[in-house]
């Protein structure tokens, strides 16, 4: 009986060790995510978390540096930045402190001056909300361009706060704000991957469908 119990314990230990084994080449969560997107299944061991861009591996830094040119990417995507929207109250479009720029909330204003308005989940679909978030991203990039002169000065998109004018029953705010995030990553690549919150609002100014804030890090 004791011998059988010992054998079972050994088998359980071997199974646990096999389950928790992580290839040594996966030194960061991002590396694990990259690998999983290539079809590998990876379990991330405790202690491998990376919470800041500066703490990422040198290899990842090098990868993000290669071919980094957001100005060129805008041209490749066929995007022409508009004149930055004028603040509608007592505030400014953006404030720089040190290496950080805090951008005020912007909405989906079209080139003709009209806005995408309405509540997502009621009179605005998820797809239309996604497009509104994309348009808002373009308007925020216009502000950055005006402040910096060159978007290559951006070293990291740090944080995004996405607010969605939502019907009370609507709960897919992240799918809407993906329109903003997807465009930002398309322009800035790895440097565009950011922390984010996507929340529902009972209403927004002018009845606009979305309003989005952004924090970016820039060169000295």
Image (cartoon, rainbow, N blue to C red):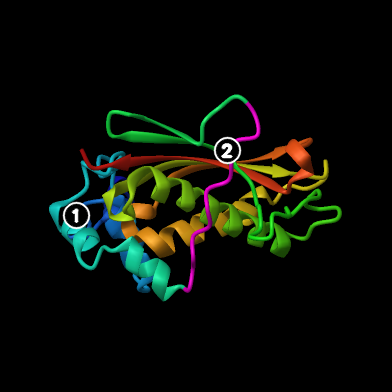
Residue 150 visible? The answer is yes
- Residue at image x 33%, y 54%? 151
| Res 12 label | none
Above or below 117: residue 128: below
- Residue at image x 31%, y 48%? 154
Q: Is residue 100 left or right of residue 108?
A: left
**Residue at numbered disc 1:** 61
In the rendered structure, which segment of residues is drawn in magenta? 78-89
Could you say which quadrant of the image residue 74 lies in?
bottom left
- Looking at the rendered image, the disc whose residue lies closer to the viewer, 2 or 1, is 2
Whether 146 is among the magenta residues is no
Quick one: label 1, few (<14), some, or many (20+) residues within 10 Å?
Answer: some
**Residue at numbered disc 2:** 105
The one nearer the camera, 215 or 39, is: 215
- Residue at image x 58%, y 43%? 212
Q: How many marks?
A: 2
Residue 16 visible? The answer is no
The quarter of the rendered structure image containing the C terminus is top left
The x and y percentages for residue 65 are: 20, 60
Could you say which quadrant of the image residue 72 lies in?
bottom left
């Amino acid at each position: 009986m004791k011998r059988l119990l010992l054998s079972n314990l050994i088998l359980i230990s071997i199974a646990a060790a096999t389950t928790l084994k992580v290839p040594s080449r996966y030194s960061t969560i991002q590396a694990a995510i990259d690998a999983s997107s290539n079809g590998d299944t990876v379990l991330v061991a405790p202690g491998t978390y990376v919470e800041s861009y500066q703490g990422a591996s040198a290899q990842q830094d090098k990868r993000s540096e290669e071919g980094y040119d957001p100005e060129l990417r805008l041209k490749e995507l066929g995007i022409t930045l508009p004149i930055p929207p004028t603040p509608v109250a007592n505030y400014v479009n953006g404030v720089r402190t040190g290496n950080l720029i805090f951008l005020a909330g912007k909405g989906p204003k079209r080139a003709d001056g009209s806005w995408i308005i309405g509540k997502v989940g009621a009179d605005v679909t998820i797809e239309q909300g996604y497009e509104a978030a994309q348009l808002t991203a373009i308007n925020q990039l216009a502000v950055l361009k005006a402040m910096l002169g060159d978007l290559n000065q951006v070293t990291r998109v740090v944080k995004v706060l996405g607010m969605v004018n939502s019907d009370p029953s609507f709960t897919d705010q992240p799918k809407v704000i993906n329109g903003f995030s997807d465009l930002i990553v398309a322009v800035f690549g790895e440097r565009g991957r950011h922390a984010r919150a996507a929340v529902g609002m009972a209403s927004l100014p002018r009845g606009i469908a979305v309003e989005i804030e952004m924090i970016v890090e820039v060169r000295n």
